[in-house]
Amino acid sequence: MRREKAPHNHYNHFNNAEVATELQDLGVKVLSGAHGQREGLAQHWEIWMMAQGGMTPLEALRTSTIDPATVFGMDHALGSLEEGKLADIIVIDGDPLKNIRDTDKVTHTMVNGVLYDAAAVSETTCRNQRCPASCCKSGDQIMVSVSPGISNGGAFITSWSSSL
């Protein structure tokens, strides 16, 4: 956190977030839009800003997950955890539905079905086994089976299977 140097009304993002919340309340799909600042942190800041504007944590998370996928016509393949969808996900040490700022407590990242340890940026699994980074061919995809709705409408991975 940085120390405050100006009163809150000088930070325009509060006004923008409040308008985004008003639009969402009217049925408009609001999408977050980070611009690459601070090596990936900007997306977290966008989500937090949505919550500062009055969105619930779940509504704020939707601005970066299922809502963009729906608007761009990709919700059949990404945006939520469902069986058969691509598994580009992050694992968070915390509960962003209780504390939206937990979104930046990433422990693992899965990209194209390969799981990486976030701290070491090294591969941890490949096709259901521990392995060195060289074992997965480029383009491999891991599909997940999930049990939806277990807690707060969330989804939990229950099994892995390779799509190859």
Image (cartoon, rainbow, N blue to C red):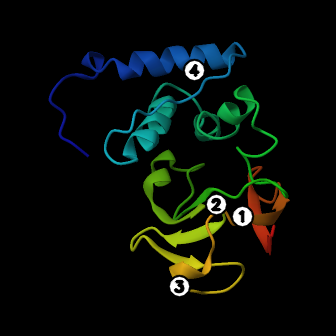
Question: Distance from label 2 to label 4 (Cα)?
Answer: 32 Å
Q: Name the residue beneath numbered marker 4.
A: 21
Query: Up-down: is 112 above or below 31?
Result: below
Give the foreground label among 3 and 4: 3
On residue 125, which mark appears? none
Q: At which x and y percent is residue 61?
A: 60, 40
Q: At which x and y percent is residue 3?
A: 17, 40
For the residue marked with disc 4, what is the amino acid? Thr
Examine the image and state in which quarter residue 141 appears.
bottom right
Give the mark nearer the N terminus: 1 vs 3: 3
Give the foreground label among 4 and 1: 1
For the residue marked with disc 1, what is the amino acid? Gln
Instruction: Look at the numbered discs 3 and 4 and tell me whether their residues touch, using CB distance below 8 Å.
Output: no
On residue 112, which mark appears? 2
Q: Name the residue beneath numbered marker 3.
A: 132
Q: Secondary structure at mark 4?
A: helix
Instruction: Look at the numbered discs 2 and 4 and tell me whether their residues touch, using CB distance below 8 Å.
Output: no
Question: Distance from label 4 to label 1 (Cα)?
Answer: 36 Å
Label 4: how many residues lie within 10 Å, few (<14), some (14-19) or many (20+)? many
Label 1: how many residues lie within 10 Å, few (<14), some (14-19) or many (20+)? many
Question: Distance from label 1 to label 3 (Cα)?
Answer: 17 Å
Give the mark nearer the N terminus: 3 vs 4: 4
In this view of the protein, which residue sits in the foreground, 136 or 11?
Answer: 136
For the residue marked with disc 2, what is the amino acid? Asn
